[in-house]
Image: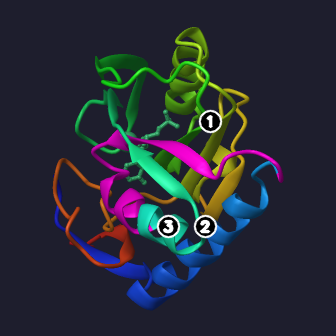
Amino acid sequence: MSPYHVEVLFTEPQLAARVDSLAAEIVAGLPEDGARELLLVPLLKGAMVFAADLMRALSRHGVTVVLDVMQVSSYGGGQTSSGHVVLKRDLGLNPAGRPVLLIDDIADTGRTLDFVQRHLAERGAGPVTTAVLLDKPSRREVEVRVDHVGFEIPDRFVVGYGVDYAERHRELPFVGVVVEDRE
Ligand code: IMP
Ligand code: MG
């Protein structure tokens, strides 16, 4: 890994404001007459920090939240995906018939969300809505439905707010771009 630094892309207040408005959008999309309850399914580990804030924002907006997690992997540790998605941890709760909010950090090629959406459908989940903090539309290889996007970003490698580079930088309170240092 050559030397690099991280440049701020979205500050902590920008993230907080967007997570709150995203929660309002998600609530507005719920059926009028339905129960205001969602089974939240963040994908470990990248969506953890986003999901922790989003679940509290949803609660402030009147949604009853039930939490479970899934873990899949596609990244080999560097900046590029292996393109092959593997299920590492399935849901503990039964999603059959329940409205699910699938949460991930970044929609990139779309393979992860496509894989998990199919998996949730196979397990009989109720309507599945998908929310991501960041979307890189220019990178899409698989057509996949993403209902709620925090921010669209260009094809840059980012870290922070749960997102890692080789398991580092998840703890940063902001989202930043990885910039290689010049020699
Ligand atoms: P996809 O399956 O190609 O859409 O990849 C989605 C996953 O790749 C995300 O959940 C992230 O874990 C990872 N990923 C994509 N772009 C980045 C990035 O810029 N930084 C860190 N991880 C990323
Ligand atoms: Mg991920």
Q: Is residue 122 left or right of residue 181?
A: right
Q: Are marks 2 and 3 in contact (CB under 8 Å)?
A: no
The residue lying furthest to the top in this view is 122
Which residue occupies 38% across, 38% down?
80
Residue 33 x/y as whole percent: 82, 48
Amino acid beneath label 1: Pro
Chain part drawn in magenta: 32-53
Choose between 16 and 62: the one closer to the eye.
62
The answer to which image quadrant residue 124 occupies is top right
Residue 53 x/y as whole percent: 40, 68
Ligand 2 under 8 Å from disc 3 Cβ? no
Disc number placed over residue 23 in the picture, else none: 2
Specify how the rendered protein is coloured.
Answer: rainbow
Residue beneath label 1, please? 99
Which label sits in the foreground, 2 or 3? 3
Disc number placed over residue 59 in the picture, else none: 3
| Magenta run includes residue 100 | no
| Magenta run includes residue 46 | yes
Amino acid beneath label 3: Ser
